[in-house]
């Protein structure tokens, strides 16, 4: 399936303070980003929405809102891009549908190799008995 590109207009960003060390600047600047994406109100196809909501991911709330927090970069723009990329990865994961597996029969050669291995293993085990004099 083709990729479903997301833009900044599809999501809601809010700037928050980043956690962790950072000196004097970290207490003043809100450079971390919290991204919110409402799956049910999005323009994604219904099948992708259903698979996205069914994912076992703690970032997806019961209301169908994906919340991603990004604070790796020191700039707001960098964190926005990081959060959007992580959301895109999540959507791409939900959009991907595995091809159904069609079971095949084992080949004649593979059956023969399997039986030969079993026979050889049986001979090894048969040779472990008590020695008769």
Image (cartoon, rainbow, N blue to C red):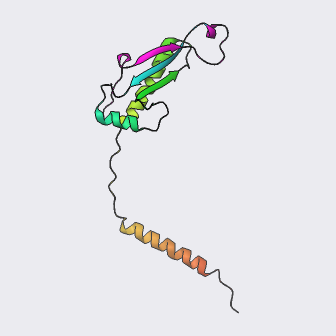
Say above or below: 96 vs 121: above
- Which residue is at a point 69% across and 87% down the rendered structure image? 131
Task: Examine the image and state in which quarter residue 54 appears.
Answer: top left
Answer left or right for 94 relative to 30. left
Which of 53/6 is in front? 53
- Which residue is at a point 34% across and 33% down the rendered structure image? 49
Answer left or right for 123 relative to 93. right
Residue 18 in percent (x, y) is at 58, 16
Which of 114/40 is in front? 40
The answer to whether residue 13 is magenta is yes
Task: Examine the image and state in which quarter residue 42 appears.
Answer: top left
Looking at this view, name the residue that lies furthest to the right: 133
Looking at this view, name the residue that lies furthest to the front: 63
Looking at this view, name the residue that lies furthest to the bottom: 133
In the rendered view of the protein, which quadrant contains the N terminus? top left
- Which residue is at a point 55% across and 10% down the rendered structure image? 30
Answer left or right for 90 relative to 124. left
In the rendered view of the protein, which quadrant contains the C terminus? bottom right
Q: How many marks?
A: 0
The answer to whether residue 28 is magenta is no
Which of 100/112 is in front? 100
Residue 64 in percent (x, y) is at 40, 30
Residue 74 in percent (x, y) is at 56, 13
- Which residue is at a point 51% across and 76% down the rendered structure image? 119
Magenta stretch bounds: 1-27
């Amino acid at each position: 399936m083709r990729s479903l590109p997301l833009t900044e207009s599809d999501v809601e960003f809010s700037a928050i303070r980043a956690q962790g060390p950072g000196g004097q600047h970290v207490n003043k600047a809100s450079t971390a980003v919290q991204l919110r994406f409402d799956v049910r109100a999005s323009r994604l196809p219904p099948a992708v929405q259903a698979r996205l909501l069914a994912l076992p991911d703690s970032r997806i709330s019961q209301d169908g809102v994906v919340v991603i927090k990004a604070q790796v970069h020191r700039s707001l723009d960098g964190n926005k891009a990081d959060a959007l990329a992580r959301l895109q990865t999540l959507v791409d994961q939900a959009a991907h549908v595995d091809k159904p597996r069609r079971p095949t029969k084992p080949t004649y050669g593979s059956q023969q190799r399997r039986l030969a291995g079993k026979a050889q293993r049986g001979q090894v085990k048969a040779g472990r008995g008590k020695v008769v004099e």
